[in-house]
Structures are given as C-alpha cells and as structure tokens.
Amino acid sequence: MMLTALGLMSGTSLDGVDVALIETDGRQIKAFGPSGYRPYTEGERSLLRQALTEAVHLSQRDARPGILRQAEQAVTTAHAEAVAAFTAQHRISPQEIDIVGFHGQTVLHRPERRLTVQIGDALALAKAIHIPVMHDFRAADVEAGGQGAPFVPVYHRALAQSLNREGPIVVVNIGGVSNITYIDGLDTLIACDTGPGNALLDDFMFRQMHQPFDTAGKFAALGKPDEAWIAQALKLPFFSVPPPKSLDRNDFAGLKLGAVAPADGAATLTAFTAAAIARVVPLLPKRPKSWIICGGGASNLTLLRMLRERLAPATVEPAEALGWAADAIEAQAFGFLAARGMKGLPLSYPATTGVPIPMTGGIIARP
C-alpha cells in the first residue's frame, strides 16, 4: 500500500528545516510531491550553536539541561511552523498525510559511547500539526552497536534504481558532514561518512567574514588551497578506516589553519572536503563510474570543480541535473524512512552503519 509521507530534516549545517512530500510504499517511490524550506533565524542559529557546545557534556540521550531545553522548544516550534506553512501553501489537509518523518536536530553523535542525541519534541509536534509523527530513527541502531549514520542510503538506492545506469554509482550528500552511498546493482549497498562537509567551511566563513556560508563557492574560488595542510589532515586515523563509519559535526573542529588569508582558508577547507570524499575510493570494492552530489554542497561550484579534478575519470554531476530535488533529498528520505518504519522494513544494514543485523527503527507519536 502506498503512503503519503511528509519528511522533515534539520541538518548539521544549522540552516533551517527542509520539508518534502513523497508517495511511497517504503520500497519504491511512486511520486515526489512539493518541497519547502523554513530557515532558522539568527537567534535560533545562535541558540543551536550554544546547544551544540553544551551537548558535549551529555551522558544521557533524553537529558535536556540548561540551554538544551530551550533549543529543543525552538526546534519543535520551527518544525511545526514549517509544516503549517507548507500545508497551507499547497492546500494539503492533515488528513491527507499518513505519517510525518521527524529527524530532529542532532546535537551530539558519539556511537562509540552508544549515544546519539537529536533534540525535538515529537509528541508536541504531532499535537501541533494533527498528524502522527515518526521520530527517533537512529536510537535502535546505535543501541545495537551500529554507527547510527548515515541513514539515507536506502533512499539513495531507491533513487538510483530509477536511473537505469551502469554501476557502481555513488551518491554523495554534503551537509555539515559528508556521507556517501555506494550502490552496485540491487545487492551491494555500502555507506559511510567521509569527513567534513560544509561545517568547517561554514564555521570559518562565520568567524572570518560574518557570513553563514560561501555562496556558490565564490570566495574559495579566489584563494589557493594549502595542499600540504590537506595531506597532513588526511593522515588522521578516521580516513583510513573502512566503511561503515560516522562522524559528529564537530569532530574536525580542532584542526587549525593557522595564519592564512581568508580566501586561501576557504579554498583549503573546500578542497579538504573534496579530498576527504576522494579518499574513500580505495576503501570501496570497485572504482565508481559516476558520482551524484546532493545536499547543500551541490550548489558550491568550486567544490564541484574540485571533486571533478579528484575523481576523474568518473563523472561528477549535481543531483539537480538528473531531475532530483537536491535540497529536498534528505527530507524526502525521512518521509521514505517513516514509510519503511511503518511497514517494519529495515532502515539500516551491516554495510551502512555496522549494525549486526538489518535494523528497523522509529517510534510513532500520535496527536
């Protein structure tokens, strides 16, 4: 049976809430609906940055001390407003939506401690929007010893199947962190985080230029990457570990550029993201033939150019070029995952998160 699912995603880039409607049975995609976006305000971003700092001290996943409670309320309100604006704009009634997939805002991801924390009150959201809400997608995976990320690979596979092209295909999602899904036919699905996505660059742009990100990579295009610094950074143990593996948004925050011109710093961090993605190639079963880039990084033209240079002779193309809604893919994925969760289908696998057996997940909060 096909379900109408509304996926919500607030990523590690802290930019805002993505909303996307999808019609699916949890295996195939019947139709894409519209998508929408509700940006975080400066005040909300500032609150979330504080929450990220305070979350480092968490030892229990349901604890919300201090600023974290306030941040959770802000995240919940932003998601409720995003859904209300989306349904009003597209004249969709709550009764037309079977399930909402609510990821929440990740503030801490420490799978080695069997701990992953996403803030957001699903019950309050369900009551506000009058639709059942599936949430807590990652907890069961982490509890079972998995990495709890990445979770989008099953959706990437469904998208790739519709392309009808020869594999291996890699779908790269560049959010705060970058992750890949390696797809080779129906049987081989491998996934992992590869390293930094936009987080290091966004934080650098915010500190140096008081801008939330480098629009289209224009600033990095003016600078020159420090290849020696990148080569040194790639010696960190994470980069030689085979998949599956995952990261917290701030795992590379300790890397310091030193005294560099701002444009050179932006160029170096952009090239580091590209080099970290390319570094995964020797760890894959076969050399990929095509790379499809989605997430916020897909609109960074400098990053795309650097990826083409480092991944040649494979093709590198933004998801938009294939007719995919690049900015909405993660939101669509959590709608898809909610449909899978309702049908008891696996959300994660040994080769995507390192979990011992294929795992279902998600908890439903009803209005």
Image (tube, grey):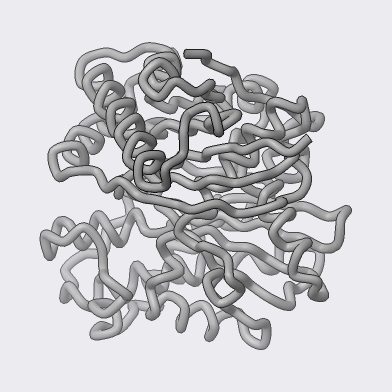
52 displayed left or right of 318: left
Can residue 55 be seen here?
Answer: yes
At which x and y percent is residue 22? 60, 46
Q: Residue 346 lies in what quarter of the image?
A: top right
Residue shown at the point (78%, 35%) measured from the top left: 1
* Front position in the image: 324 or 242: 324
Q: How many marks?
A: 0
Residue 242 visible, this orientation? no
x and y, in percent, of residue 305 in the image: 46, 83
Q: Is residue 22 above or below residue 266?
A: above
**Residue 32: horizontal and vertical position, in percent?**
60, 54
Is 246 above or below relative to 170? above
Report the front residue among 163 and 53.
Answer: 163
Where 188 sits versus 280, above or below?
above
Nearest the eye: 49 or 153: 153
Residue 292, percent across and down?
60, 70
Give residue 172's quadrant in the image: bottom right
- Please give the name of the residue rendered at 56% of the width and 43% of the height, measured from the top-left corner: 246
Residue at 43% over, 27% down: 118
In the rendered structure, the answer to whether residue 282 lies left or right of residue 110 reads: right
Which residue is found at the position 52% from the left and 49% from the top? 330
Question: Is 67 situated above or below 276?
Answer: above
